[in-house]
């Protein structure tokens, strides 16, 4: 009686399917949870200090600016100019978010009319589809194929698309978008008049062997047809702080901002001060975090390869995307791995049925646990 029909297809979030088995296995052996992408590294002390200092401000307890306080938006603009060489207007092109997740979910509600097509990539973040569906749009999957290096095939973008979610660097496949790829979809968006939303939550987690990932806004004309979501969660190990931002097209930013005035009252000002500190000190804070995740990724890929499992990381994110042995599908292998070794992996199909031959490992746990898991793998016979 007290349940919306819209919730019918959203009862189980991606990781819930093996939670019961995980609890059962934990009673008889040590469990190493590589399923969830939540950084184990403490938020850097200079960011924590900025929060504490801000708590003494006279107006910290008052409502912040709905769009994000101007000092925070200025910090975003400085960061974007220094990191991507893209100039943003703090008044028109930037909106603060209570974590990028809430902005991603609400964007379709601000952009789509009932029945409008919202396209999104699979495997991918379940929130793209959920946001489109709850907004009354028509969700359409676009599969990411291994033979295409997990990049969207422009020919598979529906003709009547109004909103297209992409995610580069990609979770879970770790694919990184090239300038050529972004140019293709920006050109298509101009031709067909749709909005691209790139989820760039992992843009600052990359291996030194690759060039830093670019922003879609680096592409000429992208500002006319694109927005890009950024998160401080992964870059600065601030997942629980809930702070992010979206940048890009002025009209889309204004639409989302207008909607959010009826949903929330903005970001706590002290957290915005901490976010400003993080962005202003990006060049000092980010590299050590990035190197730590890169080292873990390389070690885990090597451990998987030693037992004959093909491990994939294109050079970005803290995930390893691995092909399951041929005699298993993804859920079977995830259960086999958990029962035999205590290692938790996310079945690929939890992020889209197209990925039943893959599992995802997250390197967001201490080095000693990864070392322990690697030792357990050596004894595994698939």
Image: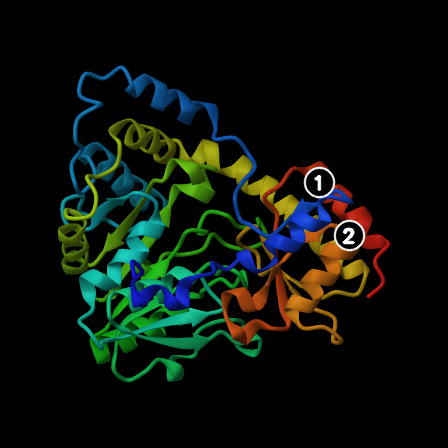
Circle 1: element type: helix
Answer left or right for 326 relative to 199: right
**Can the viewer see residue 228 in this picture?**
no
Q: Residue at x 85, y 62 (%)?
A: 381
Tell me the crowding category of disc 1: few under 14, some 14 to 19, or many 20 or more residues within 10 angstroms, Cα based. Answer: some
Q: Which residue is mark 2?
A: 341
Answer left or right for 341 relative to 360: right
Q: Position of residue 198 (x, y in %)?
A: 35, 61
For marks 1 and 2, the one nearer the N-term is 2
**Can the viewer see residue 275 in this picture?**
yes
Query: Relative to 291, does residue 382 appear above or below in the rendering?
Result: below
Q: Residue at x 40, y 76 (%)?
A: 141
Q: Which mark is residue 369?
A: 1
Tell me the crowding category of disc 2: few under 14, some 14 to 19, or many 20 or more residues within 10 angstroms, Cα based. Answer: many
Residue sitting nearer the eye, 143 or 73? 143
Circle 2: element type: helix
Residue sitting nearer the eye, 191 or 68? 68
Q: Position of residue 195 (x, y in %)?
A: 24, 68
Query: Relative to 40, does residue 344 appear above or below in the rendering?
Result: below
Residue sitting nearer the eye, 268 or 204? 268
């Amino acid at each position: 009686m007290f349940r919306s029909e819209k919730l019918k297809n959203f009862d189980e979030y991606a990781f819930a399917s093996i939670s019961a088995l995980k609890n059962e296995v934990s009673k008889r052996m040590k469990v190493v949870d590589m399923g969830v992408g939540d950084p184990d590294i403490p938020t850097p002390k200079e960011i924590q200090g900025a929060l504490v200092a801000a708590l003494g401000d006279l107006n910290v307890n008052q409502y912040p600016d709905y769009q994000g306080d101007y000092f925070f938006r200025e910090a975003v603009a400085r960061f974007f100019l220094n990191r991507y060489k893209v100039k943003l207007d703090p008044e028109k092109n930037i909106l603060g978010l209570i974590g990028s997740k809430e902005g991603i979910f609400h964007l379709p509600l601000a952009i789509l009319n009932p029945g409008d097509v919202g396209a999104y990539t699979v495997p991918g973040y379940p929130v793209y589809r959920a946001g489109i569906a709850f907004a009354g749009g028509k969700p359409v999957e676009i599969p990411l194929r291994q033979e295409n290096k997990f990049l969207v095939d422009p020919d598979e973008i529906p003709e009547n698309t109004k909103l297209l979610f992409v995610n580069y660097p990609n979770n879970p496949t770790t694919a990184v978008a090239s300038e050529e790829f972004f140019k293709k979809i920006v050109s298509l968006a101009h031709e067909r008049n749709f909005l691209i939303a790139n989820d760039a939550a992992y843009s600052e987690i990359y291996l030194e062997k690759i060039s830093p990932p670019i922003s879609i806004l680096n592409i000429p004309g992208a500002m006319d047809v694109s927005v890009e979501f950024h998160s401080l969660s992964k870059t600065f190990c601030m997942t629980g702080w809930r702070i992010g931002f979206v940048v890009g097209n002025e009209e889309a930013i204004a639409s989302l901002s207008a909607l959010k005035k009826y949903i929330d009252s903005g970001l706590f000002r002290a957290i915005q001060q901490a976010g400003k500190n993080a962005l202003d000190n990006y060049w000092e804070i980010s590299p050590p975090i990035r190197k730590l995740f890169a080292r873990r990724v390389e070690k885990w890929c090597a451990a998987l390869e030693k037992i004959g499992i093909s491990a994939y990381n294109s050079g970005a994110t803290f995930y390893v995307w691995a092909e399951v042995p041929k005699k298993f599908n993804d859920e079977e292998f995830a259960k086999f791995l958990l029962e035999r070794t205590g290692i938790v992996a996310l079945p690929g199909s939890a992020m889209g049925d197209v990925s039943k031959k893959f599992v995802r490992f997250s390197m967001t746990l201490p080095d000693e646990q990864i070392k322990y898991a690697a030792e357990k793998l050596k004894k595994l016979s698939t």
